[in-house]
Image: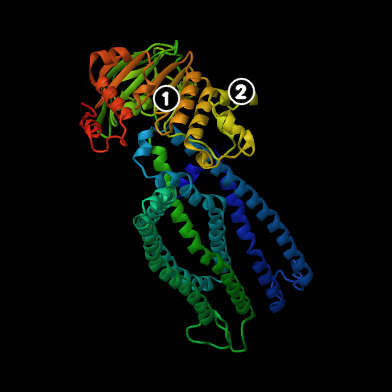
Amino acid sequence: MLTMILRLAGPHRDRLLAGVGLRMLDGALALLPVLVLFLVLREIVMPGTPGTPGTGDGGAGWTPLRAGLCMAGIVALRFIVHGASVRVGHMAGFHILKRLRLHYAEHLRGLPVSWFSRRDLGEVSGALLQDLGNVEPVLVEKLAAMGSAVTQIAVGLACIAVVDWRLALLVCCGFVPAALLMWWVNGRLRRRMPERIRVLAALTSRTVEFCQGIGVVKAFGIQGKSTALYERAVAAHRDVNLGLLRYVGAAATLYFTCLELGYAGLIGFGLPVPGDVPGNMTVGGAGGVDPAAFASFLFAAVMAFRIYGPTHDLVDLSGFMHQMRTSGRRLLSVEADVPLPVPPVSAVPADSSVRFENVAFAYDGTPVLRDITFSIAPRTMTAVVGGSGAGKTTLVSLLCRFWDVDAGCVRIGGVDVREMREEDLWRHITVVFQRFSLFNDTVRANIRFARPDATDDEVVAAAVAARCHEFIMELPEGYDTVIGENGASLSGGQRQRLSIARAMLKNAPIVVLDEATASVDLDNERLIQEAIQNMVQSKTVLLIAHRLATVASAHQILVLDEGRIVDSGTHAGLLAGGGRYARLWDMQSTVRSWNPSEQVGGASRQAFRDVPMSK
């Protein structure tokens, strides 16, 4: 456990250990008032004891005034030590958490997209939220608190043993069965805590899924089905926690009972009484109670009562530690996943040309692209068309190095993208995805995200070129309007045009348009097409499209089918060739000219059904 904590602490481990050490010192200082009380009590009941006034040996003289001053000094010292422990420990904990959050965010950013596609949203978000949330209290407070509790127990028992080892044995009688119960509970927690973390991640996923899909749920009237998934996740979370409670709750009750019985044993067998009482470990004597034995018993009783408090705390602290152990292992397992290789030196492309050379790629063993070879000359447009699942978006992912190819290579300006650092690669590429991503921030901040050092005038110029300046000025605060999560307050076309404005502001030499007009109406499509024409001037463009009318002006058109290039050429040449592209064009032309109000059941609908989709 400590090894894992120190590994997570990284460069801040010394500061973390210093905070724990100060907290342990504070725990030891917390016992000093009991020791002072014992010395004063011994002074009262045993005035002739060596080291006390009246013996002539220069004793300290535990007068009430001196005892009070000593207590005040202990309080002042504890104030300083405890304050320092909180300051040092908490600062170390929060610095560690900051480093971990940034480190794991950077690590996740470097992992291939395939890593995320194989995992549930709750598992990914759990790494940054739940697992780090479970680690936080341990690093900030609980580790130091456990160190303080263990120190108080060890020092307290040692002090009792110095005064009377028999009383220390009586106090320990409560600890032995309690320690065995703690060991048993820890074993149960180790086995069941991973399941608790798993069902919590599943509950998080179902909650996010339910909230994100609430519109679809209402539209299709499937509240029952959607709610059932959420309810099952809630029930699983409840059942796991109740299962833990059955073990931990009963064991904790027995644990506290053992401690209290140990205290009862101390009184029953350690309290000095007059005469010789069978079973009593301290002998009173015929004339009355031995003052030394009575003073020792009071000290042991008060000290035992003082250290039983931290002993109770160990139960809660143990739960935090086991939760942290499971979360720490999950974090370290994420860190063990290998990101895409980073070259020691980033190569510099000669120009903005793009070339795929004998590229092959498979996803989870299923081939997606096979022997793909083509080139895009600088400042030309190449369009890629084909049916759903043909591999068009995978081409974009390989160019952006979301994945690495299984065979062949992808080059920019003659340089393999694997030989470029990520930041250098993205300086050459800008992408407008079909699924745009906007942030819960102002319009200005969303556009400026592509280039944080851009001036306000450059932001406005990009918005004008992207045909979104007019609707921005109609917003309540113009460019300073907060648009909500993923631009919730805007229409789909407006959000897409903001994405294009962001891409235009970046001004990269290579532009990738992945179905940029697939989900918008005709008016927005016209505006987006105008924005795209403004953006792609003097750029190398890779255009992914379903609507063939948007690719007719491309210098080169590639037709993909089942991961292979089955046709290539210009729009006119492909139509003249009568191949797959020509059939797709005829099909879409038929659909555009079909008027269901004129021929509801006639030849037009039959012709539409007879047009082959991919053959």
Q: Residues within 10 Å of mark 1 (few under 14, many from 20)?
A: many
Label number found at residue 458: 2
**Marked residue nearer the N-terminal end (2 or 1):** 2
Amino acid type of the residue tagged 2 in the rendering: Glu
Coordinates of residue 27 in the picture (x, y in percent)? 60, 59
Label number found at residue 604: none
Q: Secondary structure at mark 2?
A: helix
Q: Would residue 344 be seen by someone viewing this image from the given angle?
A: no
Give the position of the C terminus as an image quadrant: top left
Q: Residues within 10 Å of mark 2 (few under 14, many from 20)?
A: some
* Residue 391 quadrant: top left
In the picture of the structure, the residue carrying the numbered disc 1 is 513
- Return the residue nearer the eye: 260 or 36: 260
Q: Is residue 85 above or below residue 298?
A: above
Amino acid type of the residue tagged 1 in the rendering: Leu
- The residue shown at (43%, 64%) is 182
Q: Would residue 376 be seen by someone viewing this image from the given angle?
A: yes
